[in-house]
Amino acid sequence: MKSDSRQFVIVMLVAALFVGWLGWRGYEVITLNNQLQADTELDNYPYLFRVLRVDGDTAVMSTLRSREVGIRQALETLFPGMRSLPQDHRERQRAEREYARLQARAGNLVTAGTGIERIRWELDNNWYHLSAMRERNPGRP
């Protein structure tokens, strides 16, 4: 086998392994998201927690709250009727507890029985962007 042919085969083999690895990572994310959607409680909630990517033994999952975006803004975006409620309203507090419970449930489902050891939560900027667009254009899907 000539040197050029050997190098070509090696490059193609490495490329095939890389593509296979990327495919496996995509399959892992899809499988975890299907698992989340199969949970009735999570599927019935207006926000869909999902796995964005897997980095080693850490799943990066979407959330509506972060250091920059508090639970108040998250819930007011999720439930617009909550904007008129005072901060200490019982319904607002119930919604905060329910969101925290379901976020923890989503994280526990992802780590249960998989190779995932940790969850890292990442703000779902895309969801906020789409919500703002829907609010500006209520007649559009």
Image: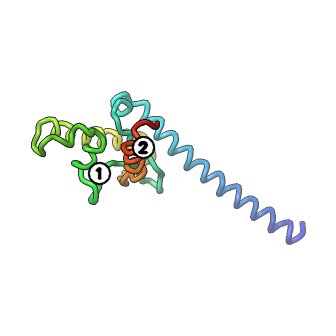
Q: Secondary structure at mark 1?
A: loop
Q: Residue at x 46, y 37 (%)?
A: 140
112 left or right, relative to 67: right
Q: CA distance from mark 1 to mark 2?
A: 14 Å
In the visual, does 14 lie left or right of 46?
right
- Find residue 50 and name its label: 2
Q: Earlier in the sequence, mark 1 or mark 2?
A: 2
In the rendered image of this protein, does residue 133 appear above or below residue 141? below
Residue 2: name its quadrant: bottom right
- Give the residue number, with chain letter if any, for mark 1: 65
User: Residue 4 in the image: x percent, y percent?
Assistant: 85, 70
Q: Callout 2: helix, strand or loop? A: loop
* 140 left or right of 20 in image: left
Q: Relative to 15, is 111 on the left or the right? A: left
Residue 138: percent from left, percent from top: 39, 38
Label of residue 44 in the image: none
* Mark 2 residue crowding within 10 angstroms, few (<14) / some (14–19) / many (20+): many
The part of the image, by quadrant, that contains residue 131 is top left
